[in-house]
Image: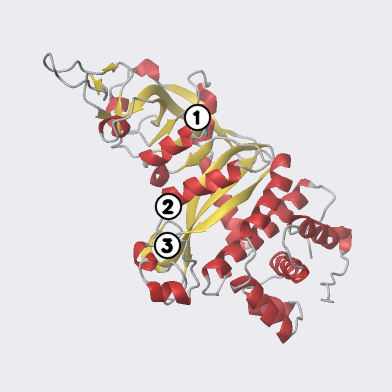
Amino acid sequence: MEAAVVVEGSAGGSRERLVGFVAEVVDGLALRRQRDNALLYVRGLVEQGGRKSLQPTLFRLHETAARYESMQQFLADSPWDPQVLVRGCAERVAPVIGVTAWILDDTGVAKDGSHSPGVKRQYSGTLGKIGNCQITVSLHAVGERGSLPLGWSLYLPEEWCQDSDRRRKAKIPDSVCFRTKPQLAAELVDAAAGWRIPIAPILADCAYGDDTSLRTRLDTTGCEYVVAVSAKTGVYGPDTSFAVPRPVGRFGRPRTVVRADQKPVSVRALAERLPAEAWQTLACRTTPRGEHVCGRFAFVRVASAHAVVRNHEPPRWEWLIVEWPQGAQAPSDYWLSNLAETTPPQRLARLARLRWTVELDYRQLKGELGLDHYEGRSYLGFHHHTALVTCAHAFLTLERLDPKAPRPA
């Protein structure tokens, strides 16, 4: 019989709660050794300071060389599905945090060398420059009482997907092919939407919002969104009319593609010609101290030009949300949203300004829980690590919601 991990008690029962929580979310793993290793790994992430890579973590936990070998295999090669853990955490924690939005984003993990899956010199918002790194796309639920990750997907550049030797060494499954970041994001949303958790409007920056296909896919699947777009994004204004032109001549072929009665304009150009009465000052964010932060916004119904002109799709009316600070020479931000036409302006403004909270998640996931400390070179191992970090993050979220629960020692 395999030996179970023994976890000693601690002040306030926090360690017992950790054991119970992990046991609940890893119940879907097939083998007892997998469940034991998952508990040990999460313990190391939550309880131990210092670098959270495997070897120093096990050293601090006074584990044996045999356990180290077992944990290496568990992370890098064991064929357990990391989504089992992420879903378990989501279905346990999401209902208690008062979910108000889902946020799509990505974060960079700085790496030396060229062997870790997906690593290359590429731009990372985390680094603020082009550097040698991995990029992982992630989906997060944020609410009134906390947040939690809902999924992770490592971005593989095209050169990685086409290099069979590098794929083999990084243990990238044959089924994994090149996907853009918006495509990876859509897959994460599709997966989470099938879980027993509250679904909420999806927020994203313009790296995702500028992707017309992503917005169309979200709308088609019934997902609401408020996503940032670039100032040059083309739209048709609210006074535009669309119609299918009549055939040319008596025997002309019937036409099916709609045409607008005017040319599209950029969202910046549209914002600049709005009358003064279109702008209103609204509270768009509340600080941790309870202070209200206000912004100056306009809300206009528009249709995306790309979908009509390039994709020959019928016009789909959306909200254009524009923020233009008083005294600024130009608007600062633009968003498109498919929320209902009756949505109150203040809700649109608050959702538009809520995306920054994902940075708090990344700060804790990296600063406290070692999201960026995985040193293995396995594609599956990377996703195993992010799933276990998600477990640690979810447990600490529950601990913070319990005023009688002290932080683990």
Q: Identify the residue at horizontal 62%, vertical 60% (top origin).
A: 82
Residue 326 seen by the camera:
yes
Q: Which residue is mark 3?
A: 156
Q: Is residue 239 above or below residue 164?
A: above
Secondary element under disc 3, as helix, strand or loop, is loop
Q: Identify the residue at horizontal 67%, vertical 40% (top origin).
A: 197
Q: Is residue 395 above or below residue 159?
A: above
Secondary element under disc 1, as helix, strand or loop, is helix
Farthest residue to the bottom: give it.
65
Q: Which residue is mark 2?
A: 181
Q: Disc 3 to disc 1, how far (Cα)?
A: 34 Å
User: Is residue 136 left or right of 34 when viewed as pictured?
Assistant: left
Farthest residue to the front: give it.
251
Q: Which residue is mark 1?
A: 349
User: Is residue 232 left or right of 216 when viewed as pictured?
Assistant: left
The first of marks 3 and 1 along the sequence is 3
Q: Disc 2 to disc 1, how far (Cα)?
A: 26 Å
- Count the marks: how many? 3
Other-residue count near label 2 (Cα within 10 Å), few / some / many at <14 / 14–19 / ≥20: many
The first of marks 3 and 2 along the sequence is 3
